[in-house]
Image (cartoon, helix red, strand yellow):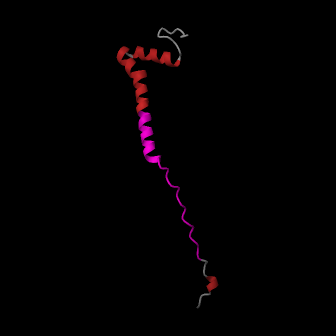
Amino acid sequence: MGTDPDDEPAPVDEPAPVDEPAPAASSGAGRQVASSGAGWLLGLLAWAWVGLPFVKGGPTAVKNVRRAKFLNKAPDGSELP
């Protein structure tokens, strides 16, 4: 009971390994610095637009700041020039 070489399945070639792209030089440290700087800036803006008016005048002062910033209105509700 001999086996014929033609009866054996052909060997499967393994695919060549795919080279992964090299990471950019500033991808790790640059992103960390940028994200921490962006968070700090966002916190500063939130403090200026919400925190300080709330401390100085309560919820009414925060409403006035939002009204002036986003609706272009004075604290009394009149249109600003």
Q: Is residue 8 left or right of residue 40?
A: right
Q: Quadrant of the C terminus?
A: top right
Residue 18 sits in quarter: bottom right
Q: Position of residue 64 (x, y in %)?
A: 45, 14
Closest to the observer, 23 or 7: 23
Residue 13 sits in quarter: bottom right
Tell me: residue 80, above or below residue 3.
Answer: above
Residue 37 sits in quarter: top left
Q: Residue at x 41, y 14 (%)?
A: 61
Total numbered circles: 0
Q: Residue at x 41, y 37 (%)?
A: 36
Q: Position of residue 77 (x, y in %)?
A: 50, 10
Tell me: residue 21, above or below residue 2.
Answer: above
In the image, farthest residue toward the bottom: 1
Range shown magenta: 11-39
Q: Residue at x 40, y 27 (%)?
A: 44
Q: Is residue 20 left or right of residue 10?
A: left
In the image, farthest residue toward the left: 55
Q: Quadrant of the N terminus?
A: bottom right
In reply to whether residue 12 is colored magenta, the answer given is yes
In the image, farthest residue toward the front: 25
Q: Residue at x 43, y 21 (%)?
A: 49
Tell me: residue 30, above or below residue 18.
Answer: above
In reply to whether residue 32 is colored magenta, the answer given is yes
Q: Position of residue 32 (x, y in %)?
A: 42, 42
Tell me: residue 31, above or below residue 3.
Answer: above
Q: Position of residue 2 (x, y in %)?
A: 59, 90
Closest to the observer, 65 or 25: 25
